[in-house]
Amino acid sequence: MGLFGKIVIGLLPIMPKFIVGWVAKRYVAGKTLDYAINTMITLGNKEGCCFTIDVLGEEISSLDEANFFLNEYVRVIDAIVEHQIDANISIKPTAFGLLIDEEKGKEKINKLLSKASENNIFVRLDMEDHRVTQSTIDIILDMHKKGFNNIGIVLQARLHRTMNDIQNICDNLGTKSDFRICKGIYLEPEDIAFTDYHDINNAFSESLHLMLKNGAYCGIATHDKPVINDSLKQIEEFGMGPITPDPRNNSGPIREGKGPGYEFQMLLGVRGELRRQLLKQGHKVRVYVPYGEKWYEYSRRRLRENPDIAWHITKALLMPWSNRR
C-alpha cells in the first residue's frame, strides 16, 4: 500500500459523505435499477461488453430484508429481459438470509433461480468471508442436484482451501462447473489465506490452471496486468482464444451467453483502458455493475480493500478527461 493510500484509509472515518459519493459515481451505477439499466445500455452500445448486475447489500439483520433482495432481483431479471441486455446477476447468500436461517435463505435463492431459469439468465453466487465459504459451496452443489444448471460460484484464490474446493466442485459437477476466480476482497487471517502479493498471484495462476484443466468455464476477475498476462498465456496454452471454439475435450457444450470457455470480468470504473484493450482483442469482457441504496457502505469497503483507488481519485482530480468508466 502506497503512502497516499494509507492516508486515504486513515481519513475514511472522517471523510464527508459527499466526497465518498463523488468517488462512488465512478464505481457505482446509481441508487436505482434505472441507473444500472442506463449504464449498461450506454456502455454496451459503445464498447460491446456484457454485464453482471449486483444489488448492493449483503449481511442483513432480518428475513424481511431478504425479501427485499429477492423482489429486487426479480425486477432486475424482468428489466434485463425487457431491454434485451446481455447480462446475468450476482447475488450474495447473506443478503438472502444465509446467516439468519440457512434453510429459508436457500428457499429464497431457489425461488430466484427458478425465475432466472425461466428467462435463461445465469446467476453467479458471490463468495463472502470465510464464515460462509463451505455453505456457499453447498448451495451450488445442492441447486445443481435440483436441476438448476444456470448457477455458478465465485472462489477466492487467496484462501488456502481453494484448490481443493475447485477439484471437489469439478468432481461433482463435471462439465457444468462454472467459476469466477478472483484474488479475494476479504482480508482473511494468515492461517487460512495468503497475504503476500506474489503468493496471491501464484495462487490465482494455479487456481485458473486447475479450472481450465478440468474443463470448467472460467470468469477471470482481475484488473492486475501481470495476472491478466499470465491468464492470456494459460488460455493460449490450452489452445483457447477469443475467436476459437473451446477445444478442450472435457469442456462440455457451448454455454449460451458465455465466451469460448472463459471470459474476463472487471469492476465498473476500474481499469477501463485495459477493459477496452481486451475487448479490441476479441475477448469477452463482463463488467460488474453494482447499484442500490447501500452505495456508501460499498464505496467505503472498496476504498479500504483497495487503497490504490486513491491514485485513480487523484488522477481524476488532476486530469478529469481521464475519468472514463
Image: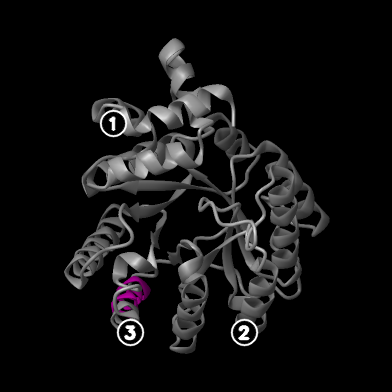
Does 41 sit above or below residue 161? above
Give the residue drawn at x 50%, y 33%: 307
Residue situated in front as seen by the camera: 100 or 285: 100
Q: On the image, which quarter does residue 72 sit in?
A: bottom left
Residue 260 visible: no
- Predominant SS of the magenta segment: helix
- In three-dimensional space, the C-alpha distance between marks 3 and 1, rounded to whole angstroms, equals 36 Å
Residue neighbourhood size for the residue with mark 2, other residues' Cα within 10 Å, grouped as few (<14), some (14–19), many (≥20): few
Q: Is residue 204 magenta?
A: no
Residue situated in front as seen by the camera: 117 or 209: 209
Question: Three-letter amino acid code at disc 2?
Answer: Asn
Q: On the image, which quarter does residue 189 sit in?
A: bottom right
Q: Which residues are magenta?
A: 108-118
User: For the residue labelled by badge 1, is the local secondary structure a helix, a strand or a loop?
Assistant: helix
> In this figure, which residue is indicated by the disc labeled 1?
21
Give the residue drawn at x 79%, y 48%: 233
Quadrant where the C terminus sits is top left
